[in-house]
Image (spheres, rainbow, N blue to C red):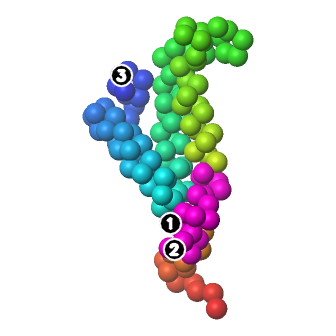
Amino acid sequence: VVAKFFGFLPGPPQFWTLSAAATQIVGAALLSVGILSRPVAASMSATMITAVIFHLLNTGGEAFPLGVPKAHSYNFELAAMYVFVLGYFAVSGAGKYSVDEQVLGGELNFYSGLIDKVTGSEED
């Protein structure tokens, strides 16, 4: 199925299928406890955007928004909902009870500290 619509990707199609599955499984575990929630949510959202594209290429728009699709559900509907929910977490982070906030002292502070270490600039 992947080779039919995403044949332009390098490497075997099984690699891309397994990497998408791993992103969703590992990402769900990390996001549920709030570890590196922004990059995890962004990567999971990218996988879901690919799923939306796949469904639109496979079944078309299904007369969206006024048509009545089979089983009364658009094939891309669930993946599109996940794109929006994961996009929220990518923008806002996991919240004050997440591991990022409790252990790392805030996700954005953690990332800015990493950037400072890489660039060699430190604020006093």
Element assignment for label 3: loop
Q: Give me the residue at 49% from left, 33% from top.
A: 50
Q: Residues within 10 Å of mark 2 (few under 14, many from 20)?
A: some
Residue that mark 1 sits on? 99
- What residue is shown at x 38% (from left), y 44% (from top)? 25
Q: Amino acid at mark 1?
A: Val
Looking at the image, residue 79 lies above or below residue 71: below
Where residue 59 appears, x then y in whole percent? Answer: 52, 14
Q: Secondary structure at mark 2?
A: loop
Q: Which residue is mark 3?
A: 1
- Can residue 92 be found in the magenta stretch? yes
Q: Amino acid at mark 3?
A: Val
Q: Are marks 1 and 2 in contact (CB under 8 Å)?
A: yes
How far apart are the two marked residues, 2 and 3, measured between alpha carbons?
41 Å
Q: Nearer the viewer, residue 99 or 54?
A: 99
For residue 111, say whether it is visible.
no
**SS at mark 1?**
helix
Q: Position of residue 104 (x, y in %)?
A: 51, 74
Whether 26 is among the magenta residues is: no
Q: Is residue 13 visible?
A: yes
Q: Which mark is residue 64?
A: none
The residue shown at (55%, 28%) is 78
CA distance for labels 1 and 2: 7 Å
Which residues are the magenta region?
Answer: 89-107
Q: Earlier in the sequence, mark 1 or mark 2?
A: 1
Measured from the top left, where is residue 13 in percent x and y?
Answer: 31, 32
Of pointers 2 and 3, the one earlier in the residue sequence: 3
Q: Amino acid at mark 2?
A: Leu
The image shows residue 9, relative to residue 69, as above or below, that is below
Residue 104's mark? 2
Residue sitting farthest toward the front: 97
Q: Quadrant of residue 82?
A: top right
